[in-house]
Structure formats: structure tokens, C-alpha cells
């Protein structure tokens, strides 16, 4: 679907919204928002576009079935047996994530019934759970400018730099969500998954060791438990002390070189064993969906049912955080909309 994604790209999308009164701004990490920071303005722009084109919108109807006869689309059936006949139908029902927003996986059910192959839906961009009890003590602690590395089966696979958050069940936040897809795949494959959090990624091991030595000199006559406040957030100190195995009551100048090196190692790679992802309902995006091999890459048309089109998260396309999922949904929707209307008008 790369052609479709390229054809209606982020520049085209921003130009579209600007035409309908939504100026956009670019924030940290290249993320784009309305200047007004008001999502309602996005809805108003889309509604204005539909009004301008004379589109009749019927909302609040749950579609229960896609109607097909002899391989040709006939329309849809809503709740209460009401049929809505149409020469083209676009299914853009989203994934299975955040069902409270309406995306409860209906598109996957429709697809299976119509004989489409559905790549198993699974959570992507999802928080991760850990078996480590100490994580609970850090609940609510947000870390900035840290590095999280994903280790699968004892091998480092990927490292992300940025912000993360400790929760009562494990870890979340932007860099964790980005890593989560790969972590989830590995867990489902029965592999050992571990995160190592580098709390001081700007410093090399040597630099960090010098930094720790400086702090130890400053607090040389204090107890170890009172010597880390320049280095770490308060809530992390008791946890790091326990994990380091250094006597918290011991005087700092009595800490051995080996103990100090152990602390440095921990600061550069705090290990968090990952046991599972949170459920698909809590994932920001659903990975999996309608197999792209069964979709015409020029039109978004189904290769199985004449007059049927797929668009958005229901399709087996998902991206990392940063707006890629919305952009992909807009691009697919743009192409599916054009193709479906061209096809319907050609029958008139
Ligand atoms: C909390 C959260 C934050 C996110 N943040 C970002 C972000 O910052 N950047 C980004 O790129 N992506 C983000 N996403 C993902 C992004 O919102 C989705 O990928 C995108 O909205 C998918 O668009 P869609 O139109 O395919 O599906 P959806 O937006 O899920 O829309 C599907 C629609 O279909 C309707 N529907 C479903 N079944 C039926 C039925 N049977 N009958 C009638 N209607 C039905 C639903 O009510 C819903 O209105 C976020 C998602 C969540 C949950």
C-alpha cells in the first residue's frame, strides 16, 4: 500500500485541513497538532468538506452485516433488520483497541464471514507488564531523557531514547509503547523478554563512574542511603539501593570499588523482566487485520467482493507512535473514498 500512503501524505493532509480552516503546528518529535489544540476543529473541517460535497451522513447506526450477492456488494444491514442498499461499501471500522471509541472488531468479523483472510489482531503500542515487585513502588514515576533497550533471548534488539513511566503493573510511556510491538511478538513466541533502562544515557561508563565517585566524595561521611539524591529521583533511591546489594546504613567511604561498579552498571542498565503486554483493549493500535494481499493496492478494493473497500486500522497496517497510524488511516480512506465513488458513479 506504499503508493497509497505516498500519494496522500502528511503534506497533503495538512494542506487539506488548512483549506478547511485548521492550521497545524509541528511539535517535538515531528508530531503535528491543530494550532488550536482542539480536536473538535478537526471534526468540523471534515464535516464542512462533506457538506460542501453534498454528502448525506447517517450516524448512530450499528452495521451488523455486509450484504453480498453473487460476489457483488449490495449494501449493509443495520440493527433492526434495516437494509441500506449501495453499489459500493467502504469498511473502516477500526481495530479492536479502545472499544469504548466504537472499534470493537466488527470489521474482522465481517471480513471472516466474507472469506477474507484476517491476520490475527494483537495489541501494538501497548504498556508492558512485569513480574518485578519493586516496580509497584515506582508507580507514577515519569523519567525523561532515558534509554530503554529491548533484550530478547539475551540479545539486544532495539533501543529507544525519550520518556517512560512506571505504573502499578509495569511500564508505559512513549518509548515503551514504541518497543511494545516487538516485545509482544517475542512473548507470544515464548521468548525471554527484558528491558534494560539506561538512566544516564548521556554519560559513558567511565564518565558515569567518575560522576558517582564525585558524589561519593561529597557524601563520604554519610550513609549510602543518603548519598544518591543528586543522582536519582527520590522514589528510585530505595529501589536502586536494594538492587545494588550495597548496605544502605554503611558509610559511603567504605563502599568498595566492586560495589561502586555494580551501582554504575545498574544506573546504565536497570533490568525489568517483561511477562506480558496489557490486553488489546488497552492498546493504542491493533496490529493485524485484513491481509493486504487481498486488497487492490491501487484502489483499496477487496479482491474477494466486487464493490467492497477496506480502509484504516481494520487493514493489517500499523505504525509506531508519532501520527503514523492516523496518517495511514487518512491515506487509505482518501483512496478508498475516491475509488468507491468513481466505481459507483460509473454505474449511473
Ligand atoms: C488513546 C488513543 C490515542 C491515539 N493516539 C494516536 C496518535 O497520537 N497518533 C496516531 O497516529 N494514532 C493514534 N491513535 C490511533 C488512531 O486513533 C487510529 O489508528 C485511527 O483512529 C484509526 O482510524 P480508523 O478510521 O481506521 O478507525 P477508528 O478511528 O477506530 O474509527 C472506527 C469507527 O467505526 C465505527 N464502527 C465500528 N464498528 C461499527 C459498526 N459495526 N457499525 C457502525 N460503525 C462502526 C466506530 O464507532 C468508529 O467511529 C490513538 C488511538 C487511541 C485509542
Image (tube, rainbow, N blue to C red):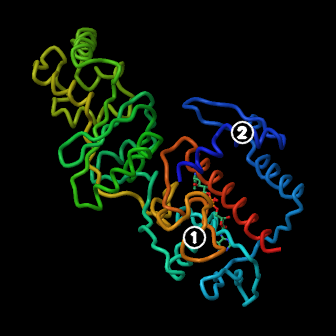
Q: Nearer the viewer, mark 2 or mark 1?
A: 1
Q: Residue at image x 21%, y 37%?
A: 243
Q: Dot 2, how many residues are within 10 Å of its Cα: few (below 14), some (14-19), or many (20+)?
A: some
Q: Are marks 2 and 1 in contact (CB under 8 Å)?
A: no
Q: Is residue 331 above or below residue 175?
A: below
Q: Which mark is residue 266?
A: none
Residue 40: x %, y % from top left:
78, 49
Q: Is residue 135 above or below residue 80?
A: above
Which image quadrant shows ligand 1?
Answer: bottom right
Which residue corresponds to mark 2?
14
> In terms of secondary structure, where does tag 1 sit?
loop
Query: Does residue 23 appear to the left or right of 206 in the view shown?
Result: right
Q: Quadrant of the C terminus?
A: bottom right
What is the spatial separation of the Cα atoms under label 2 and label 1, in whole angstroms? 28 Å
Q: Dot 1, how many residues are within 10 Å of its Cα: few (below 14), some (14-19), or many (20+)?
A: many
Which residue corresponds to mark 1?
302
Residue 233: x %, y % from top left:
39, 28
> In terms of secondary structure, where does tag 2 sit?
helix
Amino acid at each position: 500500500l506504499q503508493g497509497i500512503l505516498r500519494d496522500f501524505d502528511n503534506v497533503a493532509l495538512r494542506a487539506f485541513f488548512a483549506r478547511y480552516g485548521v492550521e497545524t503546528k509541528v511539535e517535538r518529535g515531528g508530531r503535528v497538532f491543530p494550532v488550536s489544540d482542539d480536536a473538535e476543529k478537526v471534526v468540523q473541517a471534515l464535516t464542512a468538506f462533506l457538506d460542501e460535497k453534498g454528502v448525506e451522513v447517517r450516524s448512530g447506526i450499528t452495521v451488523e452485516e455486509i450484504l453480498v450477492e453473487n460476489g457483488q456488494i449490495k449494501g449493509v444491514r443495520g440493527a433492526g433488520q434495516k437494509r441500506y442498499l449501495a453499489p459500493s461499501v467502504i469498511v473502516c471500522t477500526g481495530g479492536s483497541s479502545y472499544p469504548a471509541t466504537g472499534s470493537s472488531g466488527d470489521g474482522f468479523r465481517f471480513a471472516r464471514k466474507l472469506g477474507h483472510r484476517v491476520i490475527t489482531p494483537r495489541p501494538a503500542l501497548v504498556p508492558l507488564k512485569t513480574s518485578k515487585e519493586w516496580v509497584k513502588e515506582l508507580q507514577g514515576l515519569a523519567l525523561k531523557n532515558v534509554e530503554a533497550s529491548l533484550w530478547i533471548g539475551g540479545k539486544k534488539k532495539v533501543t529507544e531514547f525519550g520518556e517512560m513511566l512506571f505504573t502499578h503493573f509495569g511500564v508505559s510511556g512513549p518509548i515503551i509503547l514504541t518497543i511494545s510491538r516487538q516485545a509482544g511478538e517475542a512473548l507470544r513466541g515464548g521468548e525471554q523478554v527484558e528491558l534494560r533502562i539506561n538512566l544516564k544515557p548521556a554519560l559513558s561508563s567511565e564518565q558515569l563512574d567518575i560522576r558517582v565517585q564525585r558524589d561519593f566524595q561529597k557524601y563520604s561521611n554519610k550513609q549510602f542511603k543518603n548519598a544518591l539524591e543528586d543522582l536519582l529521583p527520590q522514589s528510585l533511591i530505595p529501589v536502586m539501593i536494594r538492587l545494588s546489594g550495597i548496605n544502605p546504613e554503611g558509610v559511603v567511604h567504605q563502599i568498595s570499588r566492586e560495589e561502586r561498579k555494580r551501582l554504575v552498571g545498574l544506573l546504565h542498565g536497570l533490568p525489568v523482566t517483561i511477562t506480558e503486554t496489557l490486553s488489546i483493549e488497552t492498546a493504542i493500535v491493533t496490529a493485524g487485520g485484513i491481509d493486504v494481499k487481498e486488497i487492490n493496492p491501487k484502489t483499496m478494493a477487496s479482491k474477494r467482493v466486487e464493490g467492497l473497500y477496506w480502509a484504516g486500522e481494520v487493514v493489517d497496517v500499523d505504525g509506531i507512535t508519532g501520527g503514523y497510524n492516523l496518517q495511514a488511516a487518512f491515506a487509505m480512506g482518501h483512496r478508498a473514498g475516491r475509488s468507491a465513488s468513481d466505481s459507483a458513479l460509473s454505474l449511473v
